[in-house]
Image (spheres, rainbow, N blue to C red):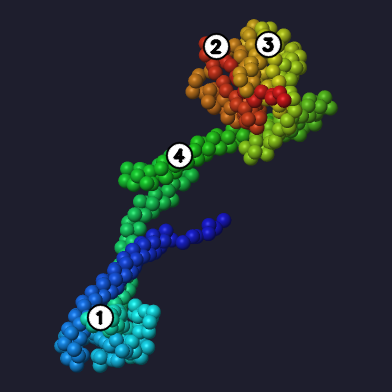
Amino acid sequence: MMLRRGKSLTGRLTVLFAVVSSSVLLILGLVIAELVERHFEDMDLELLEGKLELIQHAVLSARTEGKFDNLPAQLEAALVGHHGLAVGVWGPDGKRLFLSEEAEFPENNAPLKPGQVLPKTWKGHDEQHYRGISGQALTGVQGEPPAMVLLSTSLTHHDHFMQSFRLTMWAVVSLAALVSGFLGWIAASRGLAPLRNIVRRASDITANSLDRRIEAGEIPLELAEVVTTLNDMLGRLKESFDRLSDFSSDIAHELRTPVSNLLTQTQVMLSKVRSIDEYQDVLASNSEELERLSRTIADMLFLAKADNHLIVPTQEPVDLEAEILSMLEFYEPLIEEKQLQLTFHGHAEVDGDRLMLRRAVGNLLSNAIRHTPEHGFINIALELDGEKVSIRIENSGETIPSEHLPRLFDRFYRVDSSRQRTGEGSGLGLAITKSIALAHNGSVSVSSTDGATSFSLRLPARRSF
């Protein structure tokens, strides 16, 4: 199955660096541009208001002298050196007293009408922008209306400056995007180098080298958890591979022995003519071997379903006391033959699959009877512990070393190193018991001390409604 490749993480980080840095610079540039605009506006208004005071004083002085004839000369002198500054003055009677040559006021350079307000900025006929203010100049004559004064200044210099500023800002932002993207690519490449190192080391690990681990000495703290998880996964894989290898060897041995017996007996019988009784004996022996093979294969299929969560037990009330008593009746001849001392007490009910639970308990009971020496004892107890029911089966016998206890529920596992089986079981009984317990949300455990081995099967107790 081919994995669908996503976008490069290095590419994403590079774009992210470029976008973030460009956005910060762009926002900073827009803020600076707004502040410069306001600064220019404050400077223009300060200039215009200062000239308005000057004009008001000039109008008052000229009127005090009794005429406005000298007013244009005074205003021309006052405007010397102020390029782009325009002034318009209209007398109380609406007569124009002074107007700059390059004045560009709204309404065709006419005085404002009553209630009219001069725009904050406007565009003249020459397509240039202007900023202006209006005011009144007192004439000093009691009862005479004041003169109307309009002032404006050209924003051409400001517009050129702001245009140059914006071009520079966009150039800086574009350059910053390229530089930050390049630096981001370098940083991302170096930052992801440990991850590529992990990938390279992990790619060298195969099924034959699962004991190797990824060293975490030079790994950054942010990737330490990833390395730990990978190493833990490798440990679990190695354990699973080891169990699978052991299982393959065990199952090959389990199937080889009966098949070899069948083949040998058949070849011997076919080597010469035999009597009917001899043929019947061999066929009966072959039938036993085939039954053993059939049980082993059925048990393996059951465990395979359990591993893939295909076992779904039915839910019905199960009286464990009645089921155990029924099984003890079945094993009674064998118990009497070995002269075993048997005790049983307790009562409990669970919800589950009766046949599966009967099989699980039967495996534990048959295992106890098989490994208990003659004149030994078997104690069976049903105990209710909170929301759990415990089925404890204890038997006397040889103490099982502690290193073997965790693997007793593995398939075909033997405590002794020899592969010769003395019993009739397939070696899958305890593994099946564990699978049934897990399917019922339960568990199974074992302990062995002082010549006594105890198996405990814990299941959820039946709820009463």
Would you place residue 438 above or below residue 389 in this image?
A: below
Identified by mark 1, the residue type is Gln
Going by the image, does 226 lie left or right of 74? right
Going by the image, does 291 lie left or right of 198? right
Q: Quadrant of the N terminus?
A: bottom right
Would you place residue 408 above or below residue 141 in this image?
A: above
N-terminal label among 4 and 1:
1
Question: Which residue in the protein does label 4 denote?
Answer: 232
Q: On residue 345, which mark appears? A: 3
Question: Which residue in the protein does label 2 denote?
Answer: 451
N-terminal label among 2 and 3:
3
Question: Which residue in the protein does label 1 denote?
Answer: 142
Whether the residues at callouts 1 and 2 have beta carbons within 8 Å, the answer is no
Camera-nearest label, 2 or 3: 3
* Element on which disc 1 rests: loop
| Separation of residues labelled 4 and 1 (CA atoms) | 101 Å
